[in-house]
Amino acid sequence: MNKIKFFNGAEIPVEMHRAKVIQKLTLLPIEERKKYLKQAGNNQFLLKNEAIFLDMLTDSGMNARSDKQVSAAMTADDAYAGSRTYFELEEKIKEIFGFDFFLPVHQGRACEHLLAKGFVKEGDVVPTNYHFTTTRAHINLCGGKVEELVFDSAIVCDNDDPFKGNFDIEKLQRLIDEVGSDRISFLRIETGTNLIGGQPISLGNIKRVSEICRRNSIITVMDASLLQDNLYFIKVREEECKDKSIREITKEIASLIDIMYFSARKLGFGIGGGICFKTADLREKLKAMLTLHEGFLTYGGMSIREIASITQGLEETMDFDMISQGPRFIKYMVDELDKRNIPVVKPAGGLGCHIDARKFLAHIPDENYSAASLTAAIYLASGIRTMERGTASEERNPDGSEHFAAMELVRCAIPRRVFTMSQIDYAIDRIHWLYENKNIIGGLKFTQEPEILRFFTGEMAPLSNWQDKLVAKFKEDFGDSL
């Protein structure tokens, strides 16, 4: 395993790539940032890109492409049907994962839609290690219910469990005994559990879950969108896998799964997605729906150039140097914030650095959306867009009351091969300043609230003039600095 040591003892992740193409960034003055935030209804999704300095909202579609990906896209066989480029992707999936059957889609959400429509019936249950927002919404719309089966310790922000994404096997067996395998549409395994801090699942746990499912004739479905980070963690944290290559670990995981789907906006460094199947009969259940909802079988709503880029991106996912950059940058940011006593999810996971907003803003009650409030404060103080992953990302209970999230997190996503170390240090500095002035920050309330997935398009407003006070304190401490 490659490791670069510094003579001075510093632990700084060194990029194993160089920048050839850049995009200019602009950092607006704080007064202008405040105007943009108000226009966006304090919703980071509704901010205009022109108002953002560093975009840490998500890694979805935001990862930097390699020179080989760009080159592959320029030589793609652009055809509606029967494209050579599509069949190259199909062959790459067989080579890397061992799945013989594949359906392309325009992004991961389309995978969720097709799988829910094809397999979930009214009254069904879908066990999972931890839900994802849109996955649960698709299952609920089909009349199903998601049951989360991680260990209770997985939702404790600060502990030393290296695989918080693991299933609690006792909970899984108990659920099967209670509802019966005939009422389980499929079991969903999420690699790199998104909503609890990008925490990985171990290969050993996947083996045990797969054994139970096969014994009970339950289909196993894996969301592999964050697989590349999970592969890194399996290799560096799981003793039995330290001498295995990334390619070997990948093949072993895939051998335990019936269906694998992924967003190529994450896995593959492109914009698209796909569903992989072990058997033809599983593929047939969704084949007709694909043409109806996504497009023909050899493009599935994707640009052919994207397909070419994704094929190369999947190959690069087998390169340890390529997939280690994200987790190492994330660990650096987590460690530096932790040194400053700022509450973060530990151990560092994938996807991004996750701040515990419930502890950061302990004076703000859950009903006033501490995580959403912290995203607004971070944007004001830095021009950095982050993502709320807490109660605002949940949906209300049937009686209209709030369903408080198990964790109130702010995700500082770190897209692969995008940010420099000085930009990460800038983010750390501004978050540190906010922590020292955290008592200024107040809560938010919804002013426009959609019934489904409200965090995407809902609008909020501050409960007091705390944003004015934060701007004033910034000017006092930083003067004319941006």
Image (cartoon, rainbow, N blue to C red):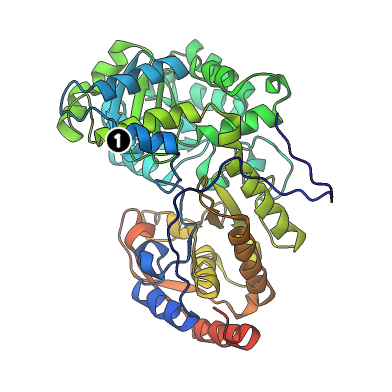
Residue lying at 60% horizontally and 30% vertically, measured from the top left: 320
The quadrant in which residue 69 appears is: top left
Residue 370 in percent (x, y) is at 54, 66
Q: Residue at x 35, y 65 (%)?
A: 46
Answer few, some or many: residues within 10 Å of disc 1's Cα (few below 14, many 20 plus, some between 14 and 19): some
Q: Is residue 216 visible?
A: yes
In this rendering, the answer to whether 59 lies above or below 84 is below
Residue 43, image quadrant: bottom left
Check disc 1 and report its element: helix, strand or loop. Answer: helix
Q: Position of residue 228 (x, y in %)?
A: 53, 33
Tell me: residue 272, above or below residue 41. Answer: above
In the rendered structure, the answer to whether residue 317 lies left or right of residue 161 reads left
Residue in the foreground of this view, choosing between 26 and 38: 26
Instruction: Classify residue 195 as left or right of residue 396.
Output: right
Q: Which residue is mark 1?
A: 74
Residue at left offset 53%, top offset 21%? 250
The answer to which quarter of the image holds residue 313 is top left
Q: Position of residue 204 (x, y in %)?
A: 64, 21
| Residue at the outermost right position | 8
